[in-house]
Amino acid sequence: MSDSHELSRRDFIKVTTGIVGGLIGAVVGLPSVFYLIDPALREGGKDAWIPIGKFEDMQVGTPYPFSFTRVQVNGWERTASSFGGYAVRRSDSPDDLLVLNSRCTHLACTVNWSEEGRVFLCPCHDAAFSMEGEVLNGPPPRALDIYEEHRVNEEGIVEIFFKEG
Amino acid sequence: MWNNIYAWLDERLGFNDLYTNLLDRPEPKTSWWNTLGSASLFLFILQGLTGIFLTVYYTPSPDHAYDSITYIMEGVAFGWLIRGIHHWGATLMVLVVFIHMLRVFFTASFKYPRELTWLIGIGLFLTTLGMGFTGYLLPWNQKAYWATTVGTQIAGTVPFIGEFILKVLRGGPELSALTLQRFFAAHIWIIPAILAALIGIHLYLIIKHGESHFPEKED
């Protein structure tokens, strides 16, 4: 029965159980991993030029607040996400426009312009940013994000290029 | 080195004892009919795993239940597979548990000292049906809605307390968001908890008493 060169009946059962179990585990397990991480593998949505306000309303030295909403289809639902920022004119030159994202670089709270301190303050952890978005105080690891691509269209309205995702 | 690690762990956890008692225990001469309990356990685990995965996307709300399942089927990678396994596994589990029960009945395995194993087995069968009944509503499609309307209406025909039972099941006099929510809670928390506890006792009793010997002509 237990000839050393041949697989014993018991070992055959063990090996077969192991192989079949492994196959079942792989058939259920591997797709499950993709199933769980699927949303992370999706490409972001559409890019668009978003109007944020009239150029003539933006005063030199006073950040101009703007906000906009993007509707994204997430799974079975359309979710509206709000975004905001400040357009900062640093000089009279129309090209000298800085469009800051008001999302704090620390933990994503929304910063507000404080006219008395002339800084952007974050309500969550008391971070302060200069008008140019540089970190002055608090825990943020880097300056405020900038909407790099912006333009003024024929009607004098400033638009920013927005990438989703 | 692995042998040393294994020996260290085994001394403290008792793998070998577990293995001997659970998987290497003596069996009477058996047949394929004796595998139905293990098959039920396997299906329970499979249903548990796929069910947990389904809750990652499923939403138990009348507004989104149907859409979220459509999304699982069409939008998520391998969603069709996970839900397909859960769907067909449910049917198969009811079938396998029922055949398991028939086998135990026909081989008279419910007799002394296994009466409690049998009674708990009845509980397992009923909870399995409960899983089927509550899970059936969750897709919130026409078939689910009307099946639950009829099912709860039948429960409502119990004399004297029928209306009370119907309201408890539906969370009110009519099928509503409350019905869907409580069926969901029953399906993923309450009944599985009972089922798991009963399985634990059932398995303990089987390990304790061993498999029953099939009766022969003289018995």
Image (tube, coloured by chain):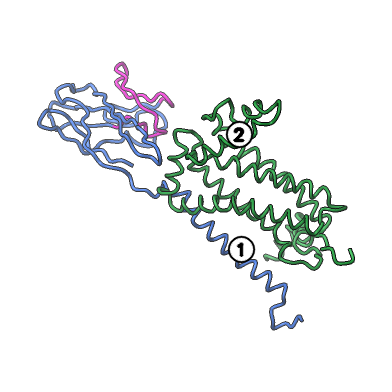
Chain colours: A blue, B green
**Quarter of image, res B99:** bottom right
Q: Amino acid at mark 2?
A: Thr
Q: Amino acid at mark 1?
A: Gly
Q: Please tell me whether residue B148 belongs to the stretch shown in magenta.
A: no
Q: Is residue A164 left or right of residue B6?
A: left
Q: In which quadrant is the N terminus of chain B drawn?
A: bottom right
Between the C-alphas of marks 1 and 2, the distance is 39 Å
Where residue B102 sits in the image (x, y, percent)?
73, 55
Q: Is residue A130 left or right of residue A23?
A: left
Instruction: Check the image and report above or below for A121 versus A5.
Output: above
- Residue B11 seen in this snapshot: no
Q: In the displayed orientation, state which residue is furthest to the left.
A: A154
Crowd class of label 1 (few under 14; some 14 to 19; many from 20; radius 10 Å)? few
Instruction: Check the image and report above or below for A122 versus B28.
Output: above
| Magenta stretch, residue numbers | A101-126
Where residue B129 sits in the image (x, y, percent)?
65, 44
- Residue B12 seen in this snapshot: yes
Subunit bearing disc 2: B
| Residue holding disc 1 | A21
Question: What kind of element bears circle 1?
Answer: helix
Crowd class of label 2 (few under 14; some 14 to 19; many from 20; radius 10 Å)? many
Subunit bearing disc 1: A
Q: Is residue B118 left or right of residue B186?
A: right
Q: Residue at x 46, y 53 (%)?
A: B78
Q: Please tell me whether residue A109 belongs to the stretch shown in magenta.
A: yes
| Residue holding disc 2 | B152
Q: Residue at x 80, y 68 (%)?
A: B29
